[in-house]
Amino acid sequence: MKTDKIRKLFLDYFENKSHKVVPSDSLVSHDPTLLFTSAGMNQFKDKFLGKDLTYTRACSCQKCFRTGDLNNVGKTPRHHTFFEMLGNFSFGDYFKDDAISFAWEFFTKILKIDSNLLWVSVYKDDDEAYEIWNRKIGVPDEKIVRLGPKENFWPSNVQKQGPNGPCGPCSEIFYDQGEKAGCGKPDCKPGCDCDRFLEIWNLVFTQYEREETGELKPLPQKNIDTGLGLERIAAVMQGVESNFEIDIFKPIVAAIKKEANSPACPPRQRENTEQYSCK
């Protein structure tokens, strides 16, 4: 399935669920506290705080830039500095129950992903989310993992490290890429550092505002903020092992290969290692 089709299916699905389709915001953020737009929720900050509620449901495909991932780019098959983030949002409308149901339906009914290959994680103290996944959706106990504030509170470790603003516990959906992609340990599961379990969708239950003192103050309303990496889900749907192998990257990679083999960039030998010297 082509990346463009996945993007359209996502936006159409949530538009049919009464969400307003909102265009991607500027990559250079309008928020004076941010330099770049790093997440789909950035442009909805006021709505999360209960202001300017001209609509209470939204979805978008946001162009994002994250300098925090620079050290991982090129080291893993899934990290980028620039990427597209699919997201659905609720501002005091639906909460955990519908957010989880929507995500599961989109994956298993619209994209037709085999549910046996999906795992989920929840914040360690979030019994409500655990019960929804287990009792309503039917995810077995052994495929639901409880994780701490670094993995399953958004932003990560916000309680101690900040930043100030809307935050809350989250639940992530993982795709099992199989034993060949993993560490081989019998107890391998989401949360392991290996590549077997690919995190593809983060459902954030935004119900607090972190204040300067570090206190988590309940927001005027409970909100939903989700992030589904377009490049990651495209890799799953196209059956490739790296985001850089999906259809939208192929022309870029082909152009790089062409330039690397051009006369302007001839190979030369030095210490038995082929290197390139481009003028």
Image (tube, grey):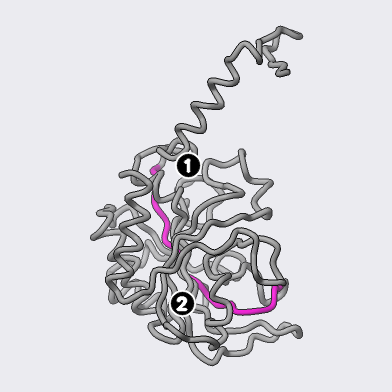
Which image quadrant: the C terminus? top right
Query: What amino acid is found at the position of numbered circle 1 in the picture?
Result: Asn
Query: What amino acid is found at the position of numbered circle 2 in the picture?
Result: Ile
Vertical position of residue 149 compared to residue 214: above or below:
above
Boundaries of the magenta span? 162-178
| Sooner in the amino-acid sequence: mark 1 or mark 2 | 2
Image point (62%, 84%), residue name: 209
Image point (46%, 48%), residue name: 231
Q: Within 10 angstroms of label 2, few (less than 14), some, or many (20 or more) residues?
A: many
Q: Which residue has dot 1 on it?
A: 243
Please indicate whether residue 248 sits to the left or right of residue 37 in the image.
Answer: left
The percent coordinates of residue 110 (x first, y second) are 25, 58
Secondary structure of the residue carrying numbered label 1:
helix
The quarter of the picture where residue 270 lies is top right
Please indicate whether residue 138 sits to the left or right of residue 122 in the image.
Answer: left
Vertical position of residue 181 compared to residue 144: above or below:
above
Please indicate whether residue 218 sits to the left or right of residue 230 in the image.
Answer: right
User: Is 174 a magenta residue?
Assistant: yes
Please indicate whether residue 84 sits to the left or right of residue 111 in the image.
Answer: right
Q: Residue furthest bottom?
A: 220
Circles 1 and 2 in contact, beta carbons < 8 Å: no
Q: Which residue has dot 2 on it?
A: 224
The percent coordinates of residue 205 (x first, y second) are 49, 77
